[in-house]
Every structure is written in C-alpha cells, then in structure tokens.
Image (cartoon, grey):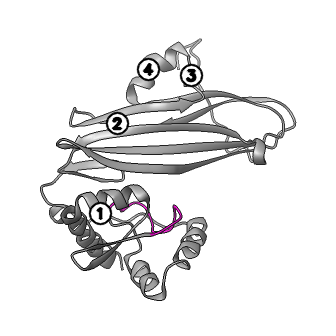
Amino acid sequence: MAIGEQFTAGFGINPQLQVQRQMVDKMRATQGGNQLLKYDYRIMISSYKTEKVKLQVWDRLPYAENYTINVMLVKTTPELSKDPTYLREQRPNNLLRWDVALDPNFRGEKAFSINFDFKLELDRQMTIGGYQTTASASPLAAPVAALAPISSGDTIKIRAAMEKLSPEDRKLAAAQVYCAIDQDSSLGVMGTIYKVMVKGQPIFLCCKGCETETKAHPYDALLQFQRLTNRVSTKR
C-alpha cells in the first residue's frame, strides 16, 4: 500500500452479526428466440449487539464478458450504495453493495431485510449450470458437471416436501434428487415439488416457473431430464 492509501482489513467472523441469504423465487419464460430467467433474493441481517453498528453488505450478479448474455438488476430495496468509488470501480463489474446501519438487537422479526431481483436474457439454445453458461445445441452433448451438495438444513426442507407426495412419486422424486430444469436446486428445497408427465415420463420440478417452462417446451425438458439422470448416476 502507498503511504496515506486507505484499505480494508478483515478480523474474522463477528458472531454477533449474522447474515442469511436465500432465493425467494425464480421464473423462466421465452421471448422470441431468447429465454428470460428471473431470480429474486433476500438477505436477512441480524444484530445481537447492544450498540448501533454500521456495515457494508456485498453480493454480486452474474457477470458476462461478452454480449451473448444480458444481465439486468431489476429492483433492489434498499437502494445500492451511493459511494462514488464503488459506483465507479465495483458496480460496473456487477458487484452489489449496500451501506446499512443496524439498531441494537435487530433480530428475529426485526431483522434487517435486503431484497433484490435480476434477470438474465440469453439464447434459447444456451444452458446454464450455476451461472457458468455454455452454448450447446443439445444438453446431452454438454460435459457432465458436478451436482451441488445438499446441506443439512436443506435436507429438513426436502424431507418435509417429499412427505407430501404419494409413496410412488416419493420414490421417483428421491431417485431424481434434483430439479430437471434447474439442476442446481434440490427437489423440495423451495417447498412444493411439482410433477409433469412428458411423453409418459414423470418429471419432477422445484418450482412453478420450472413447471411452466416444462409445459411450454416438453421436448427440451425431456432432454434436460435425461441429462440429469446421467449426472445423478455419475455422482453415485
């Protein structure tokens, strides 16, 4: 560092400040030759401190190095930081920053909430694994990628959602494990598990948006399901 230059030093986790981030909703739609993906997220911040504290909260959107994917921040509450240096240097790289002031004992129902949603617009022939996007004429031709691990907390949600299925469907969904469309999401982690029949094949999905996408493009969904079956069998 140069003499007089400011910098930030981290001193580890502060157990009196707790942050939780969760996906609230997601939606898939098509428009012409493109697919639109919309994601809603919520960040909850709890303070167990006895004094007011100021902090910065950071997140980031997917970042595309070319124009094959359009990434748009639709809405954020509260607004992003107005710091000139952040707006000049970090915001163009899709980094999100909020400047937050938490009152003492802001937790439980009083926990501070940050809500934001964004959209991805990309060609219908492109598939997304996480946020790594590669062009592929057929999902089955794509390399087999590692499936996301399931946390102990998600396991509880999954078990509760599975219990609402019939015994036969529960067995099939348990074998599929992940959503056929959004293969980064475990079945049941977002609540209700949706079932769609495609050419006699039961396909299980994680949300209403994926159900709509499957009904709109059943052939593509069946290919995605076959690809998922290959990924699950490889993992096992």
Q: Which residue carries the number 1 mark?
A: 145
**Separation (CA) of disc 4 from disc 1:** 33 Å
Q: Give the mark, 3 or 4, whose residue is nearer the N terminus.
A: 3
Q: Viewer-proximal residue, 129 or 163?
A: 163
**Tag 2 secondary structure:** loop
**Separation (CA) of disc 4 from disc 2:** 14 Å
Residue 100: % across, % down: 67, 28
**Separation (CA) of disc 1 from disc 3:** 36 Å
* Placement of the C terminus among the 4 image quadrants: bottom left
Q: Which residue carries the number 3 mark?
A: 81
**Separation (CA) of disc 3 from disc 4:** 13 Å
**Tag 3 secondary structure:** loop
Mark 4 residue crowding within 10 angstroms, few (<14) / some (14–19) / many (20+): few
Q: Which residues are magenta?
A: 181-193
Residue 221: % across, % down: 25, 64
Residue 192: % across, % down: 51, 66
The amino acid at mark 3 is: Ser
Q: Give the mark, 2 or 3, whose residue is nearer the N terminus.
A: 2
The amino acid at mark 4 is: Glu
**Separation (CA) of disc 2 from disc 3:** 19 Å
Q: Which residue carries the number 2 mark?
A: 63
Q: Give the mark, 1 or 3, whose residue is nearer the N terminus.
A: 3
Q: Which residue carries the number 4 mark?
A: 89
Residue 147: % across, % down: 37, 66
- In the picture provided, is 205 more to the left or to the right than 55? left
The amino acid at mark 1 is: Ala
User: Which image quarter: residue 211?
Assistant: bottom left
**Separation (CA) of disc 1 from disc 2:** 20 Å
Q: Viewer-proximal residue, 31 or 45?
A: 31
Mark 3 residue crowding within 10 angstroms, few (<14) / some (14–19) / many (20+): some
Q: Are marks 1 and 2 in contact (CB under 8 Å)?
A: no
